[in-house]
Image (cartoon, helix red, strand yellow):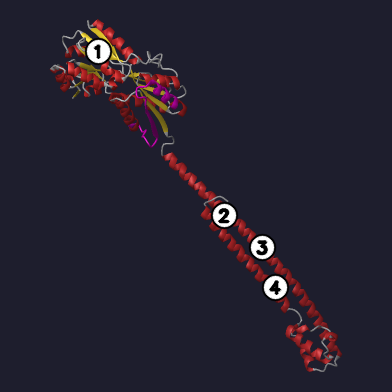
Amino acid sequence: MWGPPSLLRGEATNLARRRLTLFRLGLFVVLLATLLLVGAGPASGWTSSPQGANGLSTHEWILHEANRISALQGYEWANMAIAQPASDEPVRGNIGQSAKLIDRGNMRLRHTLLVAGFVALAVLALGALAVGCGGDTTTTTAATESTATTATTATETTASTEAKMYRIGITQIVQHPALDAVVEGFKEQMAAAGYVEGENVTYDLQNAQGEMSNASAIAQKFASDKLDLVLSIATPTSQTAVKEITDFPVLFAAVTDPVAAGLVKDPAAPDANVTGVSDLLPVGSHLELIKQLVPDVKTIGLLYNSGESNSVALVELEKAKAEEMGLEVVEATAATPAEVLTAARSLVGRVDAISVLTDNTVVSAFESVVKVCTENKIPLIAGDTDSVKRGAIAAYAFDYKQHGEQAAKMAVKILEGTPIKDIPVEYAENLMLSLNLASAEAMGVTIPDALKSEAAQTF
């Protein structure tokens, strides 16, 4: 019997009470039959024979039997015998024969009552069993119906909400405002599309703190977790994610050159399980901005991490474009955030302006570069909006929060079943100008009015 313990205990108690009541009733019926049997026997030990009348004379016996027959049967001749002498042999013969017949009837009555009593007891016993079984069946049925009702309710409740809790891993190479903005925009757009954190989606956000060993460990963890999707932010983390994860989707963001990084072969038709959004900057627009801010610029310092393939690819593009524009470049590299200050100081006195694009190592220690440029009156031009907030003079850049939103729209397509091969790599949209007037003054730069009018953001 399956059901709640309290329900089972109550049913068992009721069943025991019903069986006890029926058993008592059976005993009562048997006792009543026994009493009837005793009451139907010859009174006070009398028999139907004058020889067994306890020493009574024939006359006394006739009178006794006549009275008994009269009381039991109402025979008229028995009443006559009471009034007549006992010498009348015919009367005595009739009385003796009637007494024997009455005694035989009493014996049959005893047998009948005895059999009826046992039959009644058997019927009641069977009834008790039937009630017991019926109780079990009823309880089981009720429990089954209750379980079925609960299951149906649970099914309806589940059907009314999201049937699946999606699990998304986010791996970020280092913490800095531009990459943090990607995460923020991604989550907000996912929620707008119906994927609300804590309701039908969970995020496992991991930060490699600039260490490739950490990035590899994070990717291995995600691979073993068998997530629904991984968002890899920046080139180094995307490379490790693609290497370790092969059986579920990897969506990259903030990657400059996905082909050079080995993430995809053809951005227009990605294969395997990888696609994403590139933040490739138009380096021509970037260099033109430097010339507008520093009209007499001849040499530009390029500060980056030579270990980041995205930075290397972007620097190569920048160098080629600078050469076209008649500009010279001086390179300074930093392998870790701790080396950024030294690398920036190495450019003092050698360049007319410093360019920092979307290098994760340098941007994570951007305040060190701002310090050097402010102290030495070297114009600093960046490649992202958040770096302008932190002290660069200007940037033609993408809003990285919007970049995250763009990635989220691709993620929704993936989660809804669109094959990766049908989701080509996208590129960051809405290039805009940001200016920091205080930094320009601190670094000795006068911003033209035309740029002030064009700026989408001014700090």
Query: Magenta span has 204?
Result: yes
Q: Which mark is residue 405?
A: none
Query: Cα distance, mark 1 to mark 3?
Result: 106 Å
Question: Which amino acid lies under the numbered mark 4 shown in the image of this protein?
Answer: Ala
Query: Magenta span has 175?
Result: no
Q: Is residue 431 above or below residue 185?
A: above
Left or right placement of residue 392 versus residue 1 in this view: left
Query: Cα distance, mark 2 to mark 3?
Result: 20 Å
Location of residue 231 by image quarter: top left
Location of residue 167 by image quarter: top left
Q: Which residues are magenta?
A: 192-221
Circles 2 and 3: CB distance less than 8 Å?
no
Question: Which amino acid lies under the numbered mark 3 shown in the image of this protein?
Answer: Ala
Q: Which residue is mark 4?
A: 33
Where disc 2 sits, the SS reads: helix
Query: Cα distance, mark 1 to mark 2?
Result: 90 Å
Dot 1 or dot 2: first in sequence order is 2
Where disc 4 sits, the SS reads: helix
Circles 1 and 2: CB distance less than 8 Å?
no
Question: Which amino acid lies under the numbered mark 1 shown in the image of this protein?
Answer: Ser
Asked whether the viewer can see residue 422, the reply is no
Residue 255: image location, x then y, percent: 34, 18
Q: Which residue is mark 1?
A: 346
What crowding class fits label 3: few (fewer than 14 Cα within 10 Å), some (14-19), or many (20 or more)?
Answer: some
Q: Which residue is mark 2?
A: 138
* Tag count: 4
